[in-house]
Image (tube, helix red, strand yellow):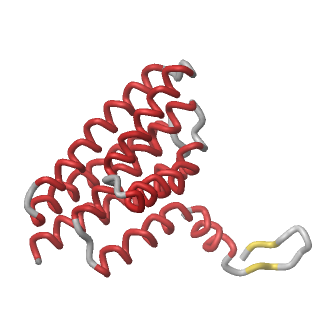
Amino acid sequence: MEASSAGVVRAGFPRWHAVLHRWPSLLGLAVAVPQLALGVDRETVAIVVCVATLCYLGAAAFDRPWVAWAAIPGASVVVTVSKITGLAWWAGTGIAALALVVVGLVNWAPRPAFTAQVWALIGYGGLAVAALAVAPRAGLVLAGLVLAVHGVWDLVHYRRDRVVPRSLAEFCMLLDLPLGIGAVVLAFLD
């Protein structure tokens, strides 16, 4: 038990504090678990990969870590508007990525971090979109593997505490790893 400044003893405070401190992990799992429970497809997993890479690229392009959190709804809008207008969602995210590259170049974003995020977007995003061009089961496996490997990318950024906030890297890690691995498992169970 812990005594507060008012002298009132609050039982369990340290435990709840630890749980609340891990809110990004809980949020990541809260997003991943329902998707797995309802069933995932290669397109959904590929979209998660591309949104994640846009978040990292946005933060690097503006040299503002908080932009990564803002990019989640922003990238979701790009995907939704693309679909509504008849443009392939991956084309919309590609256009957004090109815009972020231009912003990074114009803003003289720090080159090592910015360059790494551009290459990550090309690699992860390219493989995620390629997953749409193969058979559904193989595409789900590929997209799931790419998402899981992006979870390792999240871990690197979490440990280094650079480019994106640690909270976003933690959230993304606990979204990417379970969803990616779960997608691969579901592809083989289907």
Looking at the image, which residue is at 24% across and 50% down? 128
Does 19 sit above or below residue 83? below
Is residue 161 visible from the viewing direction of this image? no
In the image, taking residue 67 as reference, residue 154 lies left or right, namely left
Which is more toward the observer, 134 or 170?
Answer: 134
Where the C terminus falls, by quadrant?
bottom left
Looking at the image, which residue is at 22% across and 63% down? 42
Extreme-right residue of the structure:
6
Looking at the image, which residue is at 53% across and 45% down? 68
Is residue 86 visible from the viewing direction of this image? yes
Does 44 sit above or below residue 161? below
In the image, taking residue 109 as reference, residue 6 lies left or right, namely right
Tally of marks: 0
In the image, taking residue 148 as reference, residue 16 lies left or right, namely right
| Image spot of residue 39 (x, y percent) | 26, 77
| Image spot of residue 72 (x, y percent) | 50, 54
Where the N terminus falls, by quadrant?
bottom right
In the image, taking residue 61 as reference, residue 6 lies left or right, namely right
Extreme-front residue of the structure:
85
What is the quadrant of residue 156 in the picture?
top left
Looking at the image, which residue is at 34% across and 74% down? 35
Does 117 sit above or below residue 181? above
Which is more toward the observer, 34 or 74?
Answer: 74
Does 124 sit above or below residue 23? above
| Image spot of residue 71 (x, y percent) | 53, 48
| Image spot of residue 148 (x, y percent) | 27, 54
What is the quadrant of residue 9 in the picture?
bottom right
What is the quadrant of residue 4 in the picture?
bottom right
